[in-house]
Image (cartoon, rainbow, N blue to C red):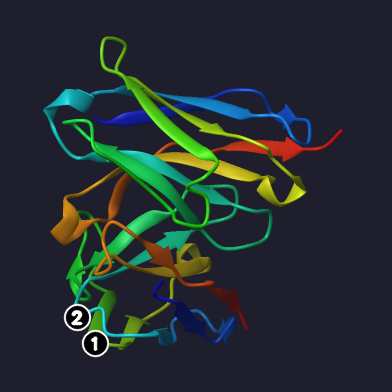
Amino acid sequence: EIVMTQSPATLSVSPGERATLSCRASQSVSSNLAWYQQRPGQAPRLLIYGASTRATGIPARFSGSGSGTDFTLTISSLQSEDFAVYYCQQYNDWPSLSFGGGTKVEIK
Amino acid sequence: QVQLQESGPGLVKPSETLSLTCAVSGYSINSGYFWGWIRQPPGRGLEWIGNFDHIGNTYYNPSLKSRVTISVDTSKNKFSLKLSSVTATDTAVYYCARLGPRWEAVVDYWGQGTLVTVSS
């Protein structure tokens, strides 16, 4: 099983600032990595797939990078609606899928 | 617009079987994609349970495989989850979901989720 580890667990950021979230895989997942956003009481929403491709309708302030075992989600200028929990997910080990433990982005 | 809606009991007793159904609208399960279940214990992260494809192949999380069955009723465009011998650790929000093919196995549509509590 590929274990996904996200850091930090909580990130305190002021509105308008940049947020950088990390996700590390226990073994290479190539570029088969996705990011999701989950607001309180809602289902997750797909942001990024293929490590760096934005899903339909996702604003350009969200960007993903990385390959192999180390990945980054960057939110260039945090808006109020961006304060949420973010999860990474690998699908390189298909059909086994695994998610990271999440990073909560909170208002500083 | 693809929509998924979970339904089923919100309370299950320990050692019994959890049963949920997902009704899909806006897309025929027979037309493609993968369909499956993901759960999230309260305050915790996401766990993939299993999924199936439109030609009947099923795939399960190895850690749950002995207790999980996913089945489909294409005539009603619904699919179901059964999880046997539940314990308190199975308490979670259960989501049904549509996933892409193996080279892009991400969730593009989610149900709203349903909380299932395991308690006597």
Chain label for disc 1: A
Give coordinates of residue A39: x percent, y percent. 52, 57
Q: Residue at x 78, y 31 (%)?
A: B13
Tell me if label 1 and label 2 are in contact, CB under 8 Å: yes
Above or below, B112 relative to B49: above
Asked if residue A76 shows in the view, the reply is: no
Asked if residue B6 shows in the view, the reply is: yes
Give coordinates of residue B9: x percent, y percent. 66, 23
Q: Which residue is drawn at 74% across and 44% down?
A: B87
- Circle number at residue A68: 1
Please identify the quarter of the rendering in which residue A92 is found.
bottom left
Q: Which amino acid does label 2 sit on?
A: Ser
Q: Which amino acid does label 1 sit on?
A: Gly
- Residue found at the far right of this picture: B120
Q: Name the secondary structure under disc 1.
A: loop
Above or below, A95 relative to A51: above
Please identify the quarter of the rendering in which residue A75 is found.
bottom left
User: On the picture, is A38 further left or further right than A51?
Assistant: right
Q: Which residue is drawn at 24% across and 23% down?
A: B26
Crowding at mark 2 (Cα within 10 Å: few <14, some 14-19, many 20+):
some
Residue of label 2: A30
Q: Name the secondary structure under disc 2.
A: loop
User: On the picture, is B72 further left or further right than A54?
Assistant: right
| CA–CA distance in space, label 1 to label 2 | 4 Å
Question: In this orientation, which residue lies closer to the viewer: B25 or B59?
Answer: B59
- Residue found at the far top of this picture: B75
Give coordinates of residue B88: x percent, y percent. 76, 47
